Amino acid sequence: MRSAIRQELDRGGQVFYVVPRVEGIEEVAEQLRQMLPGLKLLVAHGQMAEGELESAMVAFNAGEADLMLCTTIIESGLDIPRVNTILVEDAHKFGLAQLYQLRGRVGRSGIQAHAWLFYPGDASLSEAARQRLRAIQEFAQLGSGYQLAMRDMEIRGVGNLLGVEQSGQMEAIGFDLYMEMLQECLAEIQGQDIPAVDDTQIDLPLTAFIPADWIPENEEKMAAYRAAADCTSKEALVELAAAWTDRYGAIPAPVQSLLQLLELKLLAKRCGFSRIKPEKPNIALETPMEEPAFRLLRQGLPQHLHGRLVYQGGAGSTAKVLARGLGVLPIERQVEELMGWLRAMADQIPGSDGLRDAERAEEATARNAAVLSV
């Protein structure tokens, strides 16, 4: 250490001496002064007052000191051509990117530069620290930043991606295969948002109306239609049907079909379908959703039904899902099948609490069981 500093000072240069933390930096300064009597030394770190730190930097840049004792505050944006030796204490405590940046603080002119990394014996180093030090030694040539970044990912992993903990397993399959798998996952996840549609148009030939012999008064009948249109959930439709039964008697078949059609409309709207129409021999469900979102919804259906529902991209922002063969069934059966499928798909959509209906039911069951056990 003494000879490295002396060699740089003898050729008229300056030195960076980097420590990993502010704590104990004054003790290191005293040790350096004892090691090299007459050494002109400045200290710089992020906990200094702004004016004091700026003065230290300006003085060192002006050549008023031989050595700057500092933290990683110098790792970027500092260019002093006279500094061509850097010593890094406890280099094993720095990240690979930090070591690379620190090494780049010297050699900013045509003079041969030196970067000295000091660390304890191998016995006390972790495997990751040994790999970092080997990497910074191996990739010493100009323009090696990309290779170092690749090695850093192999050592540390690339963090928590796509909701799955990813911490260094990339090296088990190699970087190229990992990136290919990552691109596939990203392509699958993108477009999984269920679009919001303002309304859903149902164009199925279903007889659904309020008969005149059930509600004779026109104003009363219009109020009933408005009440039905205002329902925003199956529960509201059930309450409306009960109120109608109390007031007007047993619900006739056309009104039952109307309530069924309104429930179908609510389910389709929740699933992001804007229109349902016949396309013999199929039923088409128009939607602005992307295919990954539809695949997510389809997971709620039994596997044997996946082939019956086919996503077809359309021109512009509208696509459609074909329910193959459904259009040849009687209309009552068409509506029944559609409602069952849409209920299963709607169960795949998380609510405002982030839980699907099935998960919410499981939590409620568990809570009830816990209460009963007490």
Image: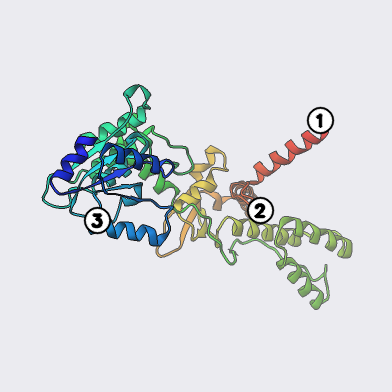
Tag 2 residue: 332
Residue furthest to the top = 123
| Viewport quadrant of the C terminus | top right
Q: Secondary structure at mark 3?
A: loop
**Residue 32: which disc?**
none
Tell me which numbered mark, 2 or 1, is placed earlier along the sequence. 2
Amino acid at pointer 3: Glu
Percent position (x, y) of residue 3?
Answer: 19, 35
Tell me which numbered mark, 1 or 3, is placed earlier along the sequence. 3
What is the crowding at mark 2: few (fewer than 14 residues within 10 Å), some, or many (at least 20)? few
161 versus 280 height, above or below: above
Amino acid at pointer 1: Ser
45 versus 130 height, above or below: below
Tag 1 residue: 373
Percent position (x, y) of residue 299?
Answer: 54, 43
Q: Secondary structure at mark 1?
A: helix
Give the label, 3 or 2, closer to the camera: 3
Instruction: Determine if residue 113 is in view.
Output: no
Tag 3 residue: 64
